[in-house]
Image (cartoon, rainbow, N blue to C red):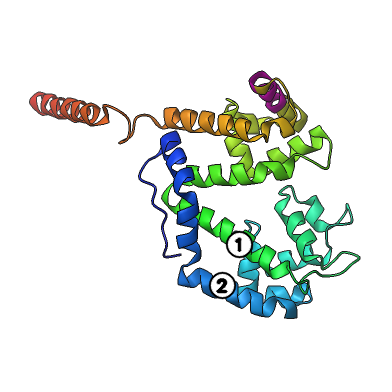
Amino acid sequence: MSFLPALPLTGYAGWNLLQRTDEAQRANFERSPEMQRDIAYFKENIAAADTPEKLVADRRLLKVALGAFGLDEKLTHRAYMRKVLEEGSENPEAFANKISDPSFAQMAKAFGYGNLAGTNVRLSDFAASITEAYQTRQYERAVGEVDDTMRLALNFKREMANYTSGSSISVQWFKLMGNKPLREILETGLGLPSEIGNIKDVDRQQSLFRNAASKLFGSDDPAVMAQPENVEIILRNYFARDAASRGPGPMTPGYGALTLLQNASSAWQNLLNLSRS
């Protein structure tokens, strides 16, 4: 995409600024010629793709279909995606339901090819729902080209509610843990070390996540974390801890003076080394 969002600040200050300008920046992004071409092509041609074979054979349709679910990297994996779509989402043993990333099952359900009622591609509102999701995801990708932490935050804010209903609390946690972008925010925002992923016992991993959530919110129910005010708490913690792990940067107060001192120290060290040689 040729459009790049304006993100003059980093960290939590940058996140607050992005939220204030988000609507206008999204509108500019969606008016970009490439985005307009993608949307128009999908709306004009998706109804004809009434089988998984036809969808994966059309690269332009598949690009939008995958992009709507954050699966852009699977564009060249056509046989894999055909299997995902052919088996649908209703059978617990379907291929999509065996993949840890729930985005595959979400896509299989949305398109409906392998489900009893059949495909949804000819429903009147189908193309609009998929292209709207595509625009949202692609905007987030564009944000990530400038600052990936902002992309992760946008995704977290949008997605949390999708993982907090329809199943037991334990299953909800496993789904959250299986989604890499959400997990990255949660690990940092809840104050967990990244090494938690090295623990082979996934039940033990879940216990650590749930204990951390309970300490912060008084509950380990993901629905509590998904409340807007708590999402913001997690994101504030995420940006603060991410900034701390990276060390001081150009936006840090006193960073210019610190850089001068570091450069001066380096210069003196070089002179000392030369005098000893």
Query: What label does residue 32 carry, if any?
Result: none
Query: What label does residue 38 carry, if any?
Result: 2
Q: Are marks 2 and 1 in contact (CB under 8 Å)?
A: yes
Q: Main secondary structure of the magenta part?
A: helix
Q: Residue 200 location in percent, x, y? A: 71, 32
> In percent of the image, x 41 and y 65: which residue is there?
2
**Which of the 4 image quadrants contains residue 277?**
top left
Q: Based on the picture, tell me whether residue 214 belongs to the magenta stretch.
A: yes
**Which amino acid does the dot numbered 2 rest on?**
Asp
Residue 49 vertical position relative to residue 265 in the rendered view, above or below: below
Residue 232 vertical position relative to residue 109 in the rendered view, above or below: above
Residue 242 vertical position relative to residue 113 in the rendered view, above or below: above
Question: For the magenta stretch, what is the residue range?
Answer: 208-216
**Which amino acid does the dot numbered 1 rest on?**
Tyr
Q: Left or right: 161 with respect to 185?
A: right
Q: Left or right: 88 with respect to 133?
A: right
Residue in the foreground of this view, choosing between 59 and 153: 153
> In percent of the image, x 50 and y 57: which residue is there?
26
In this rendering, the count of numbered labels is 2
Residue 74 in sight here = no
Q: Secondary structure at mark 2?
A: helix
Query: What label does residue 134 carry, if any?
Result: 1
